[in-house]
Image: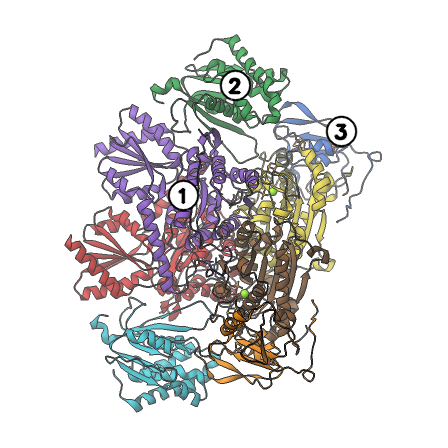
Chain colours: A purple, B red, C yellow, D brown, E cyan, F green, G blue, H orange
Amino acid sequence: MTETKLMKGNEAMAEAAILAGCDAYFGYPITPQSEVLEYLAREMPKHNRIVMQAESEVASINMVYGAAGAGFRTMTSSSSPGISLMQEGISYIAGAELPCLIVNVNRAGPGLGTIQPGQGDYFQSVKGGGHGDYKMIVLAPASVQEMADFVYLGFDLADKYRNPVLMLSDGAIGQMMEKVQFKSYTRPAVDKSWATTGKPKTRNRNYITSLFIQPERMEQHNLKLEEKFKHIRENEVRFEEINTADADYLFVAYGLSARICQKAMDIARDKGIKIGLLRPITLYPYPYKRLEELAAQVKTMLTVELNSGQMVEDVRLAVKGKVAVEFYGRMGGMMPTPEEIVQHLETLIQYHHAN
Amino acid sequence: MTETKLMKGNEAMAEAAILAGCDAYFGYPITPQSEVLEYLAREMPKHNRIVMQAESEVASINMVYGAAGAGFRTMTSSSSPGISLMQEGISYIAGAELPCLIVNVNRAGPGLGTIQPGQGDYFQSVKGGGHGDYKMIVLAPASVQEMADFVYLGFDLADKYRNPVLMLSDGAIGQMMEKVQFKSYTRPAVDKSWATTGKPKTRNRNYITSLFIQPERMEQHNLKLEEKFKHIRENEVRFEEINTADADYLFVAYGLSARICQKAMDIARDKGIKIGLLRPITLYPYPYKRLEELAAQVKTMLTVELNSGQMVEDVRLAVKGKVAVEFYGRMGGMMPTPEEIVQHLETLIQYHHAN
Amino acid sequence: MPTEEHVLPDTALDVVAPACHDEDEYELVYHKPHTMVDVSMHYCPGCAHSLVHKLIMEVVEEMDIQEQTIGIAPVGCSVFAYDYMDIDMQEAAHGRACAVATGIKRLMPDKYVFTYQGDGDLAAIGIAETLHAINRGENILIVFMNNAVYGMTSGQMAPTTLAGMHTTTSPDGRDVGYYGSPIKISELMAQLPGAFYVTRQAVNNANAVRRTKKALQNAFKYQQLHKGTCLVEIIGNCPSNWKMTPIEASKFIDEEMVKTFPLGDIKVPKAEDIKTPSASSG
Amino acid sequence: MPTEEHVLPDTALDVVAPACHDEDEYELVYHKPHTMVDVSMHYCPGCAHSLVHKLIMEVVEEMDIQEQTIGIAPVGCSVFAYDYMDIDMQEAAHGRACAVATGIKRLMPDKYVFTYQGDGDLAAIGIAETLHAINRGENILIVFMNNAVYGMTSGQMAPTTLAGMHTTTSPDGRDVGYYGSPIKISELMAQLPGAFYVTRQAVNNANAVRRTKKALQNAFKYQQLHKGTCLVEIIGNCPSNWKMTPIEASKFIDEEMVKTFPLGDIKVPKAEDIKTPSASSG
Amino acid sequence: MSNPNDFKKLEELVVAGFGGQGVLSLGMTLAYAGMVEGKEISWMPSYGPEMRGGTANCITIIAEKKISSPIISLFDTAIVLNQPSIDKFAARVKPGGLLLYESGNIFKPATRTDIEIIGIPATTEALLMKNAKIMNMIILGAYLQLKPVVKIESILEALKKVLPEKYHHLLPINKEALEKGAALVKAMKEPVM
Amino acid sequence: MSNPNDFKKLEELVVAGFGGQGVLSLGMTLAYAGMVEGKEISWMPSYGPEMRGGTANCITIIAEKKISSPIISLFDTAIVLNQPSIDKFAARVKPGGLLLYESGNIFKPATRTDIEIIGIPATTEALLMKNAKIMNMIILGAYLQLKPVVKIESILEALKKVLPEKYHHLLPINKEALEKGAALVKAMKEPVM
Amino acid sequence: MEENTNKTVSVKERKVKGRVEIDIQRCKGCELCTTACKEHALALSDTINIKGYRYIIANNDVCTGCVNCALVCPDAVITVYRTHPKKKPVDITPENIKEQIQSMISPSK
Amino acid sequence: MEENTNKTVSVKERKVKGRVEIDIQRCKGCELCTTACKEHALALSDTINIKGYRYIIANNDVCTGCVNCALVCPDAVITVYRTHPKKKPVDITPENIKEQIQSMISPSK
Ligand SMILES: Cc1ncc(C[n+]2csc(CCOP(=O)(O)OP(=O)(O)O)c2C)c(N)n1
Ligand SMILES: Cc1ncc(C[n+]2csc(CCOP(=O)(O)OP(=O)(O)O)c2C)c(N)n1
Ligand code: SF4
Ligand code: SF4
Ligand code: SF4
Ligand code: SF4
Ligand code: SF4
Ligand code: SF4
Ligand SMILES: [Mg+2]
Ligand SMILES: [Mg+2]
């Protein structure tokens, strides 16, 4: 059996990157995820991999572009303001169809905000913070184990679809320690014959670009991307359900807030409230279908987020008015306690009964 | 009567900025809106205003931050990739509650894409391309006249709410010429006693910041912002309706695509199809309420956008499943013709009849 | 390097010193400037930031320009500078202080505008904004606290980290073959015609403090004359991340830092250059 | 400036010239390099970009490194460089070519990597990535086409626009009091220890072309030896935005541009520095 | 197809050719003239990566009512000044519409029979008038002779606005060119509208 | 309140004090020991702007079952090492829970009567043992004497993991400290759990 | 390098006495002042202040009022007084002085 | 500045003849080659090519094959041949030469 370790989420992610065969990491320090760069600065050279502290997040993401375009497994990580700076680069990477893993250890915003955990970057992550029509596959870990597991998954999905994958974590999951096991992993064979590794006589030149100056060709390119995103929507939806079988009510929450909801669920069930939890694991593609099914079963959905209400829009899009979708959130790095969530739930139940 | 002029949208916007008392413009060239900087480089010095070509869009938006923080009417403009680069700065401006006007003359993306018009930056504009919970008021002009008018409006709203305002235009509206009149305008008096103009003995120091390191204070700040956004949602929704009184079907489109839909509507009505048009003028706040009302009246809504389907999500959020919301879009700088929109509409009508 | 000597304060320090009326024979000769907010600072014991804050505020007090001065705080340990300096201030995004300063100064050319930035802020992420502001000759003062590490994020390598110096991201010491040499910001920026006055100072002993203060006085004076950009680099310690006591850190500056970053003036105006004010546009 | 003279081509140009077998007495002495794609280029008549593309590809052909060379195109008129150079290429975001090159080169240290950038791209928006790549001594070649304007976006002022030069955003001529002086990128970057070879050339006459080619040859050779960053600045014309004929533009370079941007080597390695290869990490 | 009610009151025109042939200014002059007459107008250039050769075009719409879409796919009139443009736009003239082309630059005119196709040797005429730049005004004159959507006086008024003061001495030659264009058409046939 | 079924199998603990008092490592050692015993664990530090003084705390949870929320607001036990922390956390101990504090640093202990409140002069004891750094281990020893959630052997095993090799010579003094803590408690009363 | 132009005055010649006041609750015990004081007038206390730092106590008997300690104190917690100042204060009215000084005197005393 | 080390050979001494071929459809008529040619062998045509540019025509009788024109031609449309080359070709087999040259000869002829 693989050894169990006790690690911070950020460190587990860094270790997983090494085990997943990450060839290069480019990053710039920012709380609460500087451990990633620090860990890799220590460990990557031992494996003859590249780790590079860039001069900024703008440089990081464009170094990722270069290395990914040359066919290497490439990664960067940052936190909210740093991810905002990467938006142009992310749009270029998506446009040029380069596989890479980007990690956002979300802190509370807007602006400089504070360094405490938050989920205020949901929209930026799933709707597109950069310009133009593109999508990233967005994975939302809820434990240290998933911080590690989703690195493998993220790299594999990136390679499979030639698309950037974003892992959207937060400061709490990044900083907390839990047990973690590193599964043995074999990197799937992927065709990277498109990469710019130097043009041998036997093939035409490769070039990496997101530029198609003629609208006709650009539209073709857009349609090709949309085809891919459709494929992703059809094949890569991931979520976890707990206690939904008999549920009258449903929590919808991801990442850290899903963990808090789990505790709230335990408390509520002790009180006799039959509530379940749907935890989206992929935020894009989103489990619209399953939520629509559950809308036929439950009386109310309560979305809990560490923001002012972002994912709740996707829940509403899913249920199309079939059931009330309520929202409870805290902001600014404040955490809702399981108890206050239960209390909010009870109020809602009363309210919806009254109606 | 004011003189009628024939002007490009970009030039009309620049001229309006001067007439609106814009104190400073900071920008970096990018097609299709370089005319703005060029126009202002010629004209602003004559009015003793500041016009500054910055070294990048990152610099532009942060110069805007500085000047707006000092209490001046400040503006920048760019196009898609440049706006992506501004996302961190925009989040800071929103977080620090600084009034300013940002113009995005949208081109087709993602990445470098092409320089032809597009509407692919809708999500970025209205959901938040930057990190954290914030909103900009987003104005979508559909004519050269509105390119001018919304500059006044944009500045006034920005001042009123101490919030950045985004004007989301596109390459076609920026480049085309139409008649335009510049209304006489008086700048409303606004209190800018919060600005950093140098601390006299008579008041405490002012500081401009988006940093609140204690989560308790940060959450208070977030709640204050949310309160403001709620106020904006309640008071600043703007839209235009054409032929909705008797409509069985409804186009929903903004900016350039609304203009094309208008022509499609004329053609369709000639064919006896009773279709109307709802054109959101503010993309945030969005006319959810009016669309929900219309959902009770019309049989189908067809959203037309120059992207892969972005605003259509807001339309769906508005109607909550009460009516079918369809989408038709072109991408990559390609324009749908009125004829092809009508054809698509006819197919839809047939399809929904058949069901 | 002149070492600390037993000297009387120079006159610059006396300007705001009033007589001490409640103690007949004693007069007040040194006090915390009134232009500072009356709170305790969050900095680590012995941190150079706090000292430089004090010096800037002394100059502001002595020149009586509190009402006309606007400061820009960076992102870095000094992000809270506006909690301590009793003047109007703006908190800029990481690295962008010079762009923010440009926005302010261009609109209020007769105000005094200074940025206060760390080496990560100014020399890494913000080098473009810094270089271009200086090249434009923005009539501002850039106070550049070079402590050779990213203090706030707990001690990562900075562009100014010494060759071989251990940091959390250069655990085996900065490898110049891999990361290049520490950037000498002052020497580099002095090349730009827009830079009017460039000096590198320290604050690790009393005389160094006096010289730094003098440099800051010069810079504010030149700004008054609309002369272009003044860059005052200060080699400051970060005891916490250097993993030294403040006293060891002070010694480290004299023994190691100055080898890479020699102290002294790098670009000084000629006498005739500072007689008349320049046009305010530059 | 030596003017164009009537000279025989130097040997460098003959390497690929085979005998002309279908014309007995004539031999082929100059042709478009085979490392270029057989299409017409989109550049304006007389544009320097096309000429420099050709020179780079001649060197690649002559050194027989087509299979090992990766180029990075900027955003600017030369954004389509990959349509003309028959090698693997990446198109970088505006200003970020040096970051992209770093990403490529660090992972394939034995490939030849060059960026091709305009002055807006390299000196305005991309100055941070450029400066830091050079400071790290990235073992790449930076080909810097300085045409003193933003060509692609139709002639706005660039950081290298001459004092007094008219552009669409400096309609009354660049005011150095307002915008600062043109940045001398090569002189500035040569200050950084990571810069191994820095030279400024032109292509406005046959001998200038020969010298530029020589500079490019040197740079590729040094890269082979893992020596650090080579920066080849080329003063090129942009007849369209200068509103001149190509011939007038060539003259303008000799008469005006070189006053601000004197041609020649700015930093050259010592003879002993280029004898042995360096470790590949730098 | 546009609303038949507006037909008489609406002219949807495309002008296309090489950059440098005065394509954009032809359309713009017409638009200005429309404004002079108090009409509604819209002028939409195609724009490419700047400073490159290749083709340019602009859609100009002149109407009595407010104009809905500035972008349209079918035209009442196409004025084409080079071969690539005729290849592109001949098919997009509405049945019964007009295709006016510069005959010196076009070797293969269109073959449609349901539209009016007229070639004018404007380049030659312009060279005869010793000013290659006024080729577009000869074409405009011809067009207005065929479809008098605005008055010649309005065009002259418009030119005063389009041309910077320092070029006002060129107004007479422009007028001549307009007249020359009209004359060339008159020599061929009567106007269609 | 947590599920009563788990009560015996779940310890929800907060450790709080000045940065530098060994707050985080106290919790982390306990977490490691839990792992040694195959328990489920979660350790969540509070983190502030780095390198500043001020208070630090960590929430450590040790359980038989998978842990849901790593963030909780009520605790079975609060270990507090300075005054600001006791002010903050005393109210958040569950009724019947334990508040363990370092009595040398705290002048005003809590006044609740529904919880167990115990002060240990760990700083003084540590100084007597000539190593101020082991104060936290004395507290840990006291805690485990009061609530034996893990075995002392597991702690020693954990310390081997937490401490880098080069500090393994310090293991004996840590063991002594743990024993001292236990002894201090034993001298006061019998364990509560 | 700029030359140091301060005049050095030796202790023997000096006829002035100094006195320093330490705002002990804001002192962080960094000891930079102790190194700066050539008279060895300053030393660290054995007790800690409210923030947990050992603070500075002064032996004002040997203080010359040279202000070196105050100059190097990062936290500006040292106020220095001296007899026979070199310079008379100017431009300050007796009225406002009082408050100013009050505010300067540390709350701890 | 690097010194120009090319040897200058005067026309009189020279016993070589040159010939240039212009890919006229790709010539943009920039005339940079005409300035470069000291023999005045190159001139602009009166007619335009498919792209609308006047192109270059050569008087090969006076051409010396100095390649200056080709060097400065931005669009690489000039191919130069010369008699009595200074250097013999090496390392190229007779087989591959043919194709190479074929591909070099402009499609216009
Ligand atoms: C865009 C962005 N990237 C990264 C950070 C994280 N960050 C905060 S301060 C800092 C560096 C501080 O170092 P320096 O500028 O040298 O200041 P010091 O703390 O040393 O005074 C970094 C990287 C951030 N806040 N924003
Ligand atoms: C982020 C971003 N900002 C601005 C632009 C617009 N843009 C394209 S090319 C260019 C400048 C080109 O100038 P230069 O680099 O000098 O190249 P040249 O065309 O002169 O060769 C600009 C500003 C862009 N594409 N992306
Ligand atoms: S971390 Fe360093 S720079 Fe920051 S406050 Fe502490 S000593 Fe000062
Ligand atoms: S615009 Fe200038 S740089 Fe661009 S292709 Fe034309 S001449 Fe060359
Ligand atoms: S003023 Fe001078 S003598 Fe007095 S304590 Fe301070 S350093 Fe020592
Ligand atoms: S320098 Fe200041 S803070 Fe440091 S020990 Fe001395 S008095 Fe205290
Ligand atoms: S230099 Fe080349 S493109 Fe220019 S005119 Fe001569 S042959 Fe034609
Ligand atoms: S090869 Fe020399 S002589 Fe011949 S045409 Fe070219 S420049 Fe003139
Ligand atoms: Mg620093
Ligand atoms: Mg350029």
Spatial CA span between label 3 and label 2 = 42 Å
Chain containing the residue with disc 3: G
Q: Return the chain for callout 2.
A: F
Q: Are marks 2 and 1 in contact (CB under 8 Å)?
A: no
Circle nearer the viewer, 2 or 1: 2
Distance from Cα at disc 1 to Cα at disc 3: 55 Å
Q: What element does badge 1 sit on?
A: helix
Which residue does the numbered mark 3 point to in the structure image?
G40
Residue D249 shows up from this direction = no
* Residue F140 badge: 2
Q: Position of residue G47 (x, y in %)?
A: 64, 22
- Other-residue count near label 2 (Cα within 10 Å), few / some / many at <14 / 14–19 / ≥20: many
Residue at mark 1 shares a chain with residue at mark 3: no
From the image, tell me which residue sits under label 1.
B225
Q: Is residue E193 above or below residue F82?
A: below
Residue H13 makes an appearance in the image: yes
Foreground pick, C183 / C14: C183
Left or right of A150 in this view: B195: right
